[in-house]
Image (tube, helix red, strand yellow):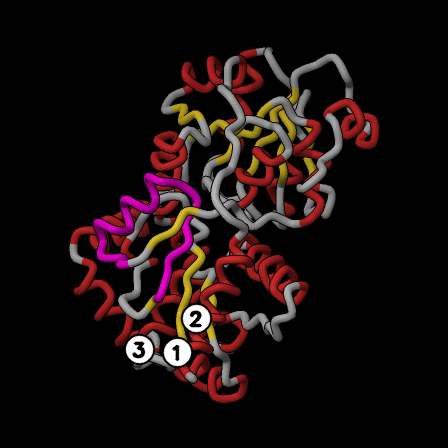
Amino acid sequence: MGAGHTVVAEELARRLRARGADCQVADLIELAGDAGDRLRRTYQRVLTTAPWLYDAAMRLWARAPRLAEAGMAASSRPFERALAAALSRTQPDLVVATYNLAAQQVGRLLPGRPGDVGLLTYVTDPGPHPYWVSERAVLHLVLSGPTADGLRRYGARRVQVVRPVLRPEFAHPPTRADARARLQLPQGRALCVVNGGSWAAGRLLDTVRVLLSTGRCLPVVLCGRDRSLQGRVRSMPGVIAVPWTTDVPQWLAAADVLVDNAGGQTCFEALASGTPVVLYRPLPGHGRINAEAMAAAGFATYARNPDELASAITNPGRVPVFEGPDPADVVMDVVARTESAAQ
């Protein structure tokens, strides 16, 4: 369902293993087989062809969360069965969810008695939404105070602000000059990296056209796995198209600003690289909510029209300092308390 959830899960697992935990990563979409494939295809199709429908569903869920969750529970039995089988095989002390559907499903499976398997949710979205909240969760980990406040309004009992989970290469990013030298980019020109996630979702070409019209930067488009977009970007003079790459840390470090439309993991990777973030034409649903939340938390500038985007790439604002503990330390503390309760 996009690379952000997986990246967080894999890195968090690496940190937990380094602290002595026996940790396994389970991909809910893969576990569910054909049902997972159908969900991913449907979500991608709706997001690209009927975004208004996705946005309407998100708004309805926010207004009537119990009704929406009852509908999800009734329609997601294959995912519940897959997770139940995985829990039976692994017999974990704690389940950490980095994907909202997984959090909801695991929450329905766990009885919630003292000493039973616990659920901890790492909320990858900065925007609060009830689809992240499970009454069975012992703790919700979030990335900002506004996100914590929003989840509490939706019924989350325990919420803690933590630092974002980022891959090791973002702990010591290269300098802008070094990154540009490696990528063979000009040193003296402003560089705007445009990102739409691994699916390159959204109206990225419209964003590129606005950037080109300003004459203030060289646009670079991270095209993800969308080969069609890559071809269209390459046909535009004065724009660099980047296909799916593992060199994202270099591109983010090389940039003067990241222009994003989802408010997801790449935004926090950019901030860790010292690159400010501007959100423009956010995706419907979670993208819109994330843009508002990131602006409220001081993580990004939310440009709502072409004039604001042109201004923002020149004055994108400061790069914040992340606060809070390492999520892996918090997880280990929860495991220790769970083991103590079981004794």
At a point 54% along the width and 39% down the height, the residue shown is: 268
Circle number at residue 112: 3
Q: Point out the image quarter for the C terminus.
A: bottom left
**Position of residue 166 measured from the top left corner of the image (x, y, whole percent):** 60, 48
Marks 3,1: beta carbons within 8 A = no
Q: Is residue 320 left or right of residue 291?
A: right
Considering only vertical position in the picture, is 260 above or below 265?
above
Question: Between residues 291 and 240, which one lies in front from this camera angle?
Answer: 291
- Asked whether the beta carbons under mark 1 and mark 2 sit within 8 Å of each other, the answer is yes
Q: Amino acid at mark 1?
A: Ala
Q: Few, some or many C-alpha atoms within 10 Å of disc 1 (few <14, some 14-19, many ≥20)?
A: few
Q: CA distance from mark 3 to mark 1?
A: 12 Å
Say which mark, if any, is on residue 341: 1
Q: Amino acid at mark 3?
A: Gly
Residue 341: quarter of image: bottom left
- Ranked by sequence position, the earlier of labels 3 and 2 is 3
Q: Position of residue 229 (x, y in %)?
A: 60, 41
Percent across and percent down for residue 151 are 29, 51
- Marker disc for residue 337: 2
Question: Quick one: 300 or 189, which is closer to the camera?
Answer: 300
Do tag 3 and tag 2 residues touch (Cβ < 8 Å)?
no
Q: Secondary structure at mark 1?
A: helix
Q: Is residue 127 above or below residue 140?
A: above
Q: Is residue 57 visible?
A: yes
User: What span is colored magenta in the figure?
Assistant: 138-157
Residue 197 drawn in magenta? no
User: Looking at the image, is mark 3 or mark 1 earlier in the sequence?
Assistant: 3
Q: Give the numbered dot on residue 328.
A: none
- Binning the other alpha carbons within 10 Å of mark 3 as few (below 14), some (14 to 19) or many (20 upward) gives some
Label 2 is placed on what type of residue? Arg
The Cα–Cα distance between marks 1 and 2, rounded to whole angstroms, is: 6 Å
Q: Nearer the viewer, mark 3 or mark 1?
A: 1
